[in-house]
Amino acid sequence: MSQRAIQAITSAQVVAGYRTYLELVAGILRPDQERIGTAMMQEVERCREALHQAARGRSVALVCGGDPGVYAMAGLIFELARARGCEVPIEIIPGISAVNACAALLGAPLMHDFATISLSDLLTPWNVIEKRLRHAAEADFVIALYNPASRKRRMQLGRARDIVMEYRPPETPAGIVTSAYRKDQAILLTTLDSLTGHGRHVNMQSTVIIGNSRTFTWNGLMVTPRGYGDKYRLS
């Protein structure tokens, strides 16, 4: 977390969020702070209550995982505020998104153009996700996959791999990072072809990064060249 995020959380009168995220920040919360914790898939309820508390004149910190503007609550808060005609001031405090954190642990896989695609079809139809995967693969983007699998969703990662393999060789480097920078962190460097063989290690806390046609591995790291070697002598 940034210092600004810590400051916002510790100074708020009300702290709201997914219960797991509230547990992660429990060490910086004050006993007198009101906590609004909801379960997964209750995003609308927690955001609605956060706006309600803010409309009462209370300072509210809505805690998200990673960056609030990347697959998180920032967009929903704005949608609800617009729908309700709510005029309370809203500040989005940037965080470290999963794709940035995981890329740093893998090496430097995002040094050229990349696309992030969520494999969760709870809010996005699967045919739309497949279309985005296909176009990103054809355009040779490095691809970062959010929400690659859950207890109920196990086929999406395999299907994503099959689509990308229509455009890239099986030995294309790929990385799986789970719970980046948390106590149960796990890092796995593999290949596009072998992704599904590691499916048991993939869950909702995982991010999968698939290299482009020029991505290579070196010393156990995943690197996508920016193009300096084509213009300058590096040796």
Image (cartoon, rainbow, N blue to C red):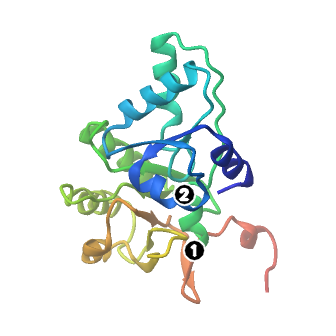
| Residue 81 drawn at (x, y percent) | 51, 19
Q: Residue 3 is drawn in which quadrant?
A: bottom right
Q: Quadrant of the N terminus?
A: bottom right
Amino acid type of the residue that numbered disc 2 sits on in the rendered structure? Val
Depth check: give the residue in front, 94 or 42: 42
Is 62 left, or right, of 36 in this rendering? Answer: right
Amino acid type of the residue that numbered disc 1 sits on in the rendered structure? Leu
Tag 1 secondary structure: helix
Can I make out residue 218 in this image? yes
Tag 2 secondary structure: loop
Residue picked out by circle 1: 105
Depth check: give the residue in front, 86 or 32: 32
| Residue 25 drawn at (x, y percent) | 54, 57
Q: Nearer the viewer, mark 2 or mark 1?
A: 2
Q: Residue 204 is drawn in which quadrant?
A: bottom left
Task: Determine the residue positioned at 65% across, 69% down.
Answer: 225
Q: Residue furthest top?
A: 85
| Residue 111 drawn at (x, y percent) | 65, 63
Residue picked out by circle 2: 25
Depth check: give the residue in front, 189 or 29: 29
Give neighbour class at mark 1: few <14, some 14-19, many 20+ (Cα, 10 Å): some
Depth check: give the residue in front, 88 or 69: 88
Give neighbour class at mark 2: few <14, some 14-19, many 20+ (Cα, 10 Å): some
| Residue 207 drawn at (x, y percent) | 43, 62
Task: Determine the residue positioned at 21% across, 55% down.
Answer: 153
The vertical placement of 174 against 57, above or below, is below
